[in-house]
Image (cartoon, rainbow, N blue to C red):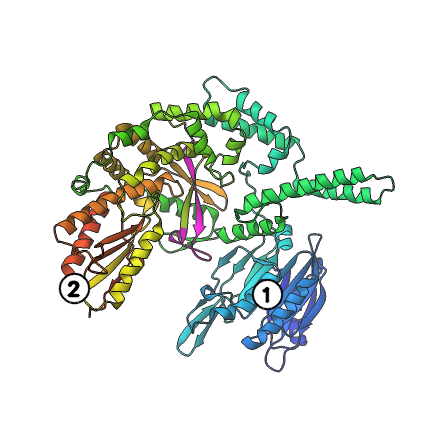
Amino acid sequence: MHKKHHPGLLFLSETKNKKTVLQNIQVDLGYDSLFTVEPHGLSGGLALFCVDEFQVNVVYSDNRMIDVEAVIEGNNVFLTFVYGDPVQAHRNHVWERLTRFATNRNGPWFMIGDFNEISGHHEKQGGRTRFDASFLPFNQMIEDCGMLEFPCSGNLMSWVGRRGRTQVKCRLDRALGNEDWHECFPHSNVQYLRMWGSDHRPILANVLARPIRRKKSFRFDKRWLDREEISQVVQEGWSSNLPAGANIMDKISSVRRALGIWRSNNDLNAEKHITDLKETLDALYCHDNTTTDDITEATKKLHEALKSEEVFWKQKSRVMWLREGDRNSKFFHAATKQRRARNRIARLKNEQGQLEETEEGIVAVATRYFRHLFETSNPEEIELVLSKVKIIITDTMNEALTRPVTENEVKIALFAMHPEKAPGLDGMTALFYQKFWDLLKEDIVRMVNEFLIDGTIVPGMNETNICLIPKKEKPQEMVQFRPISLCNVSYKIIYKLLCQRLKKILPNFISETQSAFVAGRQITDNILIAQELFHSLRTNPGGRNKRMAIKTDMSKAYDRVEWEFVEAVMRKMGFAETWIRWTMKCITSVSYHVLINGQPRGNITPKRGLHQGDPLSPFIFIICTEVLIALLNEAENEGRITRMRVARASPPVSHLLFVDDSLFFCKAEPRECNEVMTILQKYGNASGQRINFEKSSLLFGKRVP
């Protein structure tokens, strides 16, 4: 291991050897210095091997840690090498010592070692289940010390042992760094190496790692709005040096270039600007001839710069619940670093179950996954399942959906968007369009009208980034990510407008058993009804019939929706051909790139699926679900499924739908169960939906043996 990685600092715990033995190892490995803590009998012992380059100076040591000062790339840093107490009752002494360090410690601080503790249930496999409260002291120490995780690769279960006949795995070893450390060494990462010769995995912290330099993606920066010249820059970029007939994407590209040139020609380094302002203010205080007005003006400029920096990091952090103006810059900065570390993809399993750790390998796995997911299943029996769907869209509804668009309607759609949500591929947030509405409105309204009249979508406008949000700690499989679509705001304006129109008529034809995404209804309505039904199943011994509930979850529900099915459903319900053309153009014109560690990679052209994160998608989905409801209602009316009542006078219920989760109630008989499953299979064959049996379950009533 040493020959392969050549670490500049090497920490060993449980050495069980005197210093004389460790000195021989020092010579063999070629380290310049060695610091040890002697073992107690045949247990314990710590050793820290160092090279002179890091100028290591030991500050504190005991049988549980070695705390040092060092110099790394000219930065004075603190390094704490930890060996947590194996006895749980004694670990608090270690946490208290580390917390005391934090009270008077400024600057970059790094911890690494065998902490002999885990932060939660997710860091343990096998063995007895611990109480949640037992994790609190360790997590409180991490929080009090301001420590953040690093991006990790390898098997995080760093210790393997046995308790009786049961194998137990835990993440006892880790490395942490405070915010200052992440700022000084932003590319630090941790590798969990192969286990050999010990029941612990060695962990390798790469402090000076350097990423591959890439062209930085353009992002509209909210701080630019504080500059007086920004309006002129945007106006020139939007209006100048463009050929006749330039479309909105051409103009956005022109503005991006203009902003890029302006940013390069002006000193917009906020950190340097704040430092200069602090030095100026300090100099004014020291100068005898300084007036009160001078200090007031300098203080005002500094506060404005600090406010601007806070706003920037709030935008980057995606934290929405704190007010701007409270000087939360350090919090937002830390939140951003932590989010990036948590979301970083270091490895992915391919289709054969092998881990891909190179960037190209990870990109290939993600791209193949989405291409397969968005491949059509060639739906069957669409006409058959639609035979029971009635025409329910009236001429009045169609007129409301397809009426000519007004400038005010476009403005309402734009300003209904959150100004600082993550942008699409072009990097422009809704804030840009909102702040410069007066300049852009003519082109935006023209773009919307061209779409509504001719069905024209400007090339590139519907190119969409897929952001992968981890569902669990350190995911290694694509199914462990939640994909979210990041669309260009120019395209969002169109579907937001369609969404506002459709939203108004949904309550007129969406069944009452669907309560999500329908104006005037709340998803909690169905939850309360479901609770009453479950309570009746568990407690009501009366009645002649044995009852049961079937809970189903649709796998990748939005991603599997067949476009052919969507179009057929809308046509059968009586939607105007104009509306169908608009909706299908929005759905089918999309192309995707996958964001891998912040970079858009791969090209994916889907053949089915709805945007995740698009407000129009839930409406389309619940419209399609009306087909399933029609099939269920037919089966109920023909006596093939029996509805359930909680009391004699209560309304009967056979199903409750929560978008991609569903509840079905019927007699606990094979005939009715088969009927429900047959209906679901027919609906799935036509729509592309597939039940996720791992997340589905059954609940039987009290009278069922």
Segment colored magenta: 459-481
Disc 1 element: helix
Residue extending furthest toward the top: 244
Q: Quadrant of the N terminus?
A: bottom right
Relative height, residue 313 to residue 532 (above, below) = above
To which residue does mark 2 refer? Answer: 545
Disc 2 element: loop
Report x, y in % for residue 572: 21, 35
Asked if one can make out residue 48 in the rendered structure from this viewpoint, the answer is: no
Q: Residue at x 62, y 62 (%)?
A: 145
* Displayed quadrant of residue 109: bottom right
Report x, y in % for residue 608: 31, 40
To which residue does mark 1 refer? Answer: 141
Residue extending furthest toward the right: 288
**Mark nearer the N terminus (2 vs 1):** 1
Q: Residue at x 55, y 44 (%)?
A: 316
